Amino acid sequence: MRKRLIAPIVFEMRTQLIRDAADSGPVAVRRSVLTRLRALSVPALAALIIISCSDDSTGPSDAGISMSDAVEIVKDSVLTAEVPQGCSFVCIRMSGTIPEGSTIEEDAPAGWQTPLTRTAGASFAVDEESYFFYLDLAPRTFYEHPVKYVVVARSSGDYAVTEARWWPEINGQTPDQFLKAVPDSDFVVATNVVLRNPTGSEMMFTIPALYTQTAEGFIVVQGLMPDEALFGDATTTYLNGVNFFNSYKNSVSSVEGLVEGQADEVLDEIDEMADEGKYLITIYIIAHGSVDGVSLGGVGISANDFTTKMNEHPTVQFNFILGSCHSGSFIDNLSALGNVRVALTACASDEGAKPDWDNVSGTTDHNTEDSGSEWTSSLLEAAETLTSNTGYWTTILSNASTHGVPATCELLCAARYGCLGANPGFGLTQDLDLSHRLDHTTPQGYCSWEFPLYR
């Protein structure tokens, strides 16, 4: 008899206990060609334990299975069982095997706690040489979102599946192919989406001098680290924001950028701008995130952290633009404050934000020349249209006066509708957000002078 254990770092359980529980747990092990195995998938915060027994005389040869054999096992058995019906996916392999004793850990932000995720990420070890596959159930999407880790034992072809919400670290490192928006085709085992690199470039903006602004502050934040998925897209998204607000601001306003390890200093930057006398502060963030939280330089900052900070400066007005996954969850917190004028998010609380999309399922983006995250680039493009047309800007000023809000607030609210093709009064009738056109995302918005609250 042969026993195999894929054991979590944080748990030790006896074989009999697992066998007793197996009847009530979800099955996460294939029936190999010659062997039927029993298994229990244990979500218990982080890990998966698999005990399997088979007769050595009926198993594979001592040489074990090849990569091509493992790929076929994943295609034939894992994907059919683990990909929900109608779900987009891409399954990516590593270039070789991982050795006995390798640790696999979910690369969630330290101390990450939200309603959608566990307190601690998935974490387990393998006790024999294995093949590793990464099943992404929301490709071309920022994190967090559903993913699965698939381990196939080289000696037997037995496999185990672990659910997670972030990319994996294997022995402390994440293979490059797991971090790319479009992985190298050599590593793609199977997918039901067409994966293409976007064609746009960093966006530049030409906005005439707008003398009606007074002293405003603009904080542009890029929260991803270089070793995180979609870092390139986030960097472009950040540069787009810097370019727009530098073109838009006047001589008495300022733009401050915070990137990577500096990103979690955003709350301190709010204090500094308030102390400088900025009467309106606009915060623009691209980051990975979850319900009521964003990851800024690997540090979790909650929606409540932002509302607490804004509440400390009641005489300052705020605009908040968030391009992270599940970002719509922030609006309830922010809209409760009397000094938050505008809160705009890339998606609803149960959705994932998208990087640049040019063509999906045969549908082409109306503005393929844009770059960076799909919603933020569309928002900025609409805002440029409104500021570059004298007639439109005059209307923005008039509406701002009527509503008793700064012009920047009125601009962002109008751009919010315009980028989705819902502002015909300003000639904005094309939905520039391809992920919204295809019903993948539902951008959310709050403008304090609108009633009822429109989302």
Image (cartoon, grey):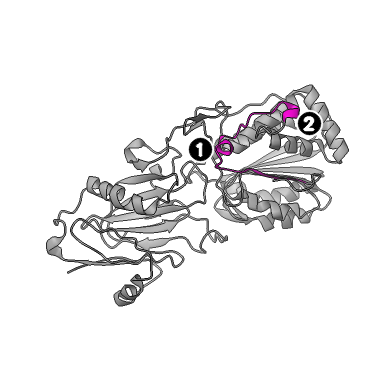
Mark 1 element type: helix
Disc 1 marks a residue whose amino acid type is Gly
455 or 212, nearer to the observer: 455
Instruction: Check if residue 106 falls in the magenta segment.
Output: no
Q: Residue at x 59, y 56 (%)?
A: 300
Res. 286 visible in picture: yes
149 or 255, nearer to the observer: 149
Q: Work out which residue is located at the far front of the displayed protein and give it.
A: 85
Q: Taking 365 as reference, is 46 above or below it?
A: below
Q: Which residue is mark 1?
A: 232
Q: Quadrant of the N terminus?
A: bottom left
Q: Work out which residue is located at the far left of the displayed protein and give it.
A: 57
Span colored in magenta: 424-447
Give percent across and percent down for residue 306: 69, 54
* Numbered circles on residues, count: 2
Give percent across and percent down for residue 252: 80, 34
Disc 2 marks a residue whose amino acid type is Ser
Q: Taking 397 as reference, is 263 above or below it?
A: below
